[in-house]
């Protein structure tokens, strides 16, 4: 037996400490999530502003979408220009199921996720074989295909008018989503659970496999990683969270519109990631809040809001060369390292 | 035992590897040498699945690996380090090796547990110690010196517990002192691990000092094989590659 084989045999006997450290981090995440949810849940008690609750619901929808995009962009190095198709698919899938079949809401959620998984597997199986710009443009092509289908199949999707007449929200388990506060709390629950799940993915061994693929896919295959399978898996997982964001949006506006599946949604997702940062898990969430605040305030003062947003993008892309959270984390780390060096 | 039988690969009209047959005995240390364009790296690319051979067999303990994908070949027990260090730049040394062990244990797809897995620690730790990287474990790979990046590349191959380790110019781009330190490491890990090591090297002083067995490739064919003394005295090899500086005086 070589020494390496001996070390391999010893692996199974070792390191409860390492496992304990990982567990502590998981509990810490859970604690942070619970605290965040508690703060959000208290909001309706301290403020009667409907606009504020609406803002948080929109943040939930876009935050889930943007963070899921970061699983592809930031963690795996797959820049998708078509991720918005799954946001649209979630909104339309959920809306159509509720309008045409009228099942309980949780069942419609699960059915929409199942549909998204099937579609994402088919599209992903084709796209993830491609590299860099080819991947980006083929995902965009699929998004435009889905968008065109929504527009042209008007007997089923409502065409350019979208799903009209509202989406039914039958009460379930004592939860009535036609009640604004209930809808708000449900959105917060989905946001917190979604973020927790994505955090777990990012911090799992699979998350590190993704980082290796991002850094050097060729080397990853030479240590035995099936790169195609790992990419397809994260593509489908990210699609599921984007679809959940779309469902939250459909619940919020009680409808689904072709814009939800248009390429601009994907563009906003990439913009959010640039704004908040891709190297920090909460970067896209911060980017979402910033973008929505910018959108809401700038559009109130000027019709040229596009120019203002363009300037902001340039500031982050050329000025900081990274998203806000990445900038802050890097600044803090450097400061801490300098302080410990002096100490 | 790694047996190469009639291996061939052409790029258009150029025969990069032509009908190469050679056996690498278990536990041997073999140097592959030859002029630029001799087909040395292509030879490694064929063995590791980066290229598909046009003909021939690559038998590892009787199992033909020709045409299989790199992950399949790695799982059969062939590890590889590259001429230009091929590493994961954003990961630390420790993370790199822990993740590589996880991949080798087929736990790279685990979603419900946190990284790092406890059962990956000892192997990563052992290889870090073996290659002198333990005190740099928290350094990001991109921040390592060139020599340490090459060591990390070798560590990545070694941590998978291969039966055969292929090293493509392990000393490329290093200064003289760093070069000898690296080659001592290669020699040490061969001694300790008892695995088959095949390495490509241009520095004949290094080759003649540490390799008990040498294969000379030229224009995709095996020109000669033998011990350092046999190669040094081989007139054909002297004419084609060594010249009079490294060849024995006529």
Image: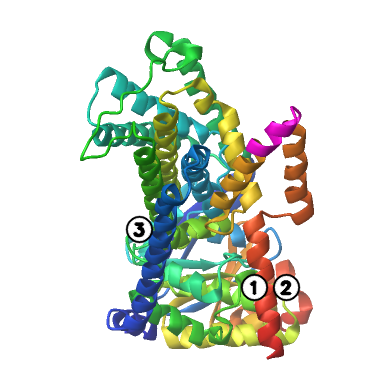
- Which quarter of the picture shows residue B78? bottom left
Camera-side residue of A256 and A1: A256
Give the CA distance from mark 2 to mark 1: 32 Å
Q: Which residue is at the far top?
A: A155
For image coordinates 62% across by 83% down, the residue present is B182
Pointers 3 and 1 within a single chain: no
Q: Are marks 3 and 2 on the same chain?
A: yes
Task: Tell me the mark number nearer the camera, choosing from 3 and 2.
Answer: 3
> Split into 4 quadrants, where in the image is the C terminus of chain A?
bottom right
Tell me if residue B193 comes above or below residue B37 in the rendering.
Answer: below
Callout 3 environment at 10 Å: few (<14), some (14 to 19), or many (20+)?
Answer: some
Chain of the residue under label 3: B
Q: Which mark is residue A333?
A: 1
- Which badge, 3 or 2, is on the more N-terminal residue? 3
- Of residue B76 and residue A261, the one placed in the foreground of this image is A261
Q: Which residues are magenta?
A: A296-305
For the residue labelled by badge 1, is the local secondary structure a helix, a strand or a loop? Answer: helix
Tell which of A73 and A46 is nearer to you.
A46
Front of the two marks 3 and 1: 1
x and y percentages locating residue A25 in the rendered image? 41, 71
Find disc 3 in the rendering and name its residue: B111
Disc 2: which residue: B173
Report which quarter residue A121 is drawn in.
top left
């Amino acid at each position: 037996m070589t020494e390496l084989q001996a070390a391999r045999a010893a692996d199974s006997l070792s390191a409860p400490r390492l496992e304990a450290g990982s567990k502590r981090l998981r509990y810490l995440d859970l604690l942070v999530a619970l605290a965040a949810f508690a703060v959000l849940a208290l909001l309706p008690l301290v403020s009667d502003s409907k606009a504020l609750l609406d803002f948080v619901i929109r943040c939930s929808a876009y935050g889930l979408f943007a963070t899921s995009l970061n699983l592809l962009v930031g963690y795996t190095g797959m820049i998708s220009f078509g991720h918005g198709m799954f946001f649209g698919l979630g909104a339309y899938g959920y809306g159509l199921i509720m309008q045409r079949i009228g099942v309980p809401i949780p069942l419609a959620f699960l059915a929409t996720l199942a549909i998204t998984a099937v579609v994402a597997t088919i599209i992903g199986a084709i796209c993830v074989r491609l590299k860099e710009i080819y991947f980006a443009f083929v995902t965009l092509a699929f998004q435009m295909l889905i968008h065109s289908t929504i527009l042209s199949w008007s007997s089923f999707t409502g065409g350019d008018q979208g799903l009209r007449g509202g989406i039914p929200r039958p009460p379930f388990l004592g939860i009535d989503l036609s009640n604004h506060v209930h809808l708000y709390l449900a959105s917060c629950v989905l946001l917190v659970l979604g973020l927790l799940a994505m955090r777990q993915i990012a911090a799992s061994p699979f998350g590190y496999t993704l980082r290796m693929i991002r850094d050097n896919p060729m080397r990853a295959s030479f240590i035995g990683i099936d790169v195609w399978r790992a990419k397809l898996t994260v593509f489908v997982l990210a699609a599921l969270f984007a679809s959940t964001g779309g469902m939250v949006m459909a619940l919020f506006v009680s409808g689904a519109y072709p814009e939800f599946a248009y390429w601009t949604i994907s563009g906003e997702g990439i913009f959010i990631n640039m704004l908040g940062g891709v190297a920090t898990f909460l970067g896209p969430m911060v980017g979402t809040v910033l973008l929505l605040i910018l959108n809401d305030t700038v559009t109130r003062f000027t019709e040229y809001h596009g120019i203002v947003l363009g300037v902001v993008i340039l500031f982050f892309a050329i000025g900081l060369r990274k998203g806000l959270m990445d900038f802050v984390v890097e600044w803090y780390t450097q400061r801490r390292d300098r302080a410990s060096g002096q100490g | 035992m790694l047996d190469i039988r009639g291996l061939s690969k052409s790029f258009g009209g150029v025969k990069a590897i032509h009908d190469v047959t050679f056996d690498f005995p278990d536990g041997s240390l073999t140097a592959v040498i030859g002029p630029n364009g001799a087909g040395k790296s292509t030879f490694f690319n064929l063995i590791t699945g980066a290229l598909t051979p046009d003909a021939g067999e690559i038998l590892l303990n009787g199992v033909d690996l020709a045409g299989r994908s790199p992950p399949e070949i790695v799982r059969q027990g062939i590890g590889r380090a590259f001429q230009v260090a091929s590493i994961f730049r954003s990961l630390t040394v420790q993370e790199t090796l822990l993740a590589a062990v996880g991949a080798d244990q087929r736990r790279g797809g685990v979603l419900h547990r946190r990284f790092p897995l406890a059962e990956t620690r000892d192997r990563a730790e052992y290889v870090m110690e073996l290659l002198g990287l333990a005190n740099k474990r928290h350094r990001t790979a991109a921040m390592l010196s060139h020599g340490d990046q090459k060591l990390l590349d070798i560590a990545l191959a070694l941590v998978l517990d291969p039966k055969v380790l292929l090293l493509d110019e392990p000393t490329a781009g290093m200064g003289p002192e760093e070069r000898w330190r690296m080659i001592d490491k290669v020699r040490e890990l061969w001694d300790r691990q008892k695995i088959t090591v095949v390495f490509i090297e241009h520095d004949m002083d290094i080759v003649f000092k540490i390799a008990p067995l040498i294969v000379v490739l030229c224009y995709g064919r095996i020109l000669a094989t033998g011990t350092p003394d046999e190669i040094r005295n081989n007139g054909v090899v002297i004419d084609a590659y060594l010249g009079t500086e490294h060849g024995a005086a006529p």
